[in-house]
Amino acid sequence: MSDQSNQKPILALIGIGSNVNPEYNLHLALDRLSAQVSIQQLASIWQTPAVGSDGPDYLNSAVLIESFLYLTHLKNHLLSGIEHDLGRFRSDDKNSDRTIDLDILMYDGVCLDDDLWNQAHVAVPAAEIFPAFTNLQTGETLSQAALRLVSGKPFFKRNDLSWGNRNR
């Protein structure tokens, strides 16, 4: 068996966002991702304010993929490679503008990112795909967390944007 592949496919939920030419960069990132893994489901595209900065609004979504890749290879090679290819520049400012941001939110049924429960820009798209996923510590479902986190915030679905014929 390869050091980068599982014997069975796993599902992973990837958060995807951009606030630098986001309409273009989201689609380009999805093209690169779909060349390497099987896209199972796509959440809607949501416009959200930048978190922690005065930068332009983000477009955010979530992508459910099926892959044979181990977690470390998925993160450190595939996703980081796409970010690098699309001009993602990492600096000390973790809230800087981004051409693309790809984060593994869930891998093989396990939550890997606490932002799933704490940030609307992550929770809302993810809740479209896994609404009943439950926080084992609080009992709150992802759908409930999304409603809680978005309440009163300037956060809206971009019905004028779509993934085209990719959405299943």
Image (tube, rainbow, N blue to C red):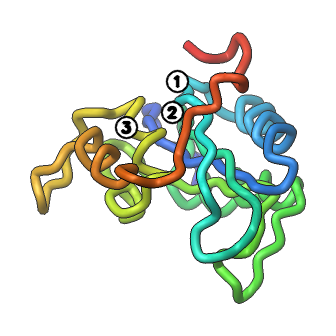
Q: Are marks 3 and 2 in contact (CB under 8 Å)?
A: no
Secondary structure type for disc 3 = helix
Above/below status of 108 relative to 27 = below
Q: Earlier in the sequence, mark 3 or mark 2?
A: 2
Identity of the amino acid at label 2?
Answer: Leu
Q: Quadrant of residue 116?
A: bottom left
Residue in the image at 59% along x and 76% along y: 52
Specify the amino acid type for callout 3.
Ala
CA distance separating discs 1 and 3: 12 Å
Mark in front: 3 vs 2: 3
Q: Residues within 10 Å of mark 2 (few under 14, many from 20)?
A: many
Left or right, 145 with respect to 66, comes to left
* Residue drawn at point x = 61 percent, y = 17 percent: 167
* Image coordinates for residue 97, horizontal then vertical, percent: 77, 68
- Label 3 and label 2: CA atoms lie apart by 12 Å
Image location (x, y in percent) of residue 22: 80, 46
The percent coordinates of residue 91 (x first, y second) are: 76, 83
**Residue 158 has which mark?**
none
**Disc number at residue 41?**
1
Percent x, y of residue 157: 56, 33
Left or right of 123 in this view: 61: right
Residue identifier under label 2: 64
Task: For label 1, count other residues whose C-alpha is less than 10 Å away and answer few (under 14), some (14-19) or many (20+).
Answer: some
Labelled disc at residue 127: 3
In contact (CB < 8 Å): disc 1 and disc 2: yes
Q: Mark 1 falls on what kind of element?
A: strand
Q: Nearer the viewer, residue 89 or 78?
A: 89
Q: Earlier in the sequence, mark 1 or mark 3?
A: 1
| Picture mark count | 3
Which residue is at 64% across, 64% downward?
50
Distance, label 1 to label 2, CA atoms, is: 5 Å
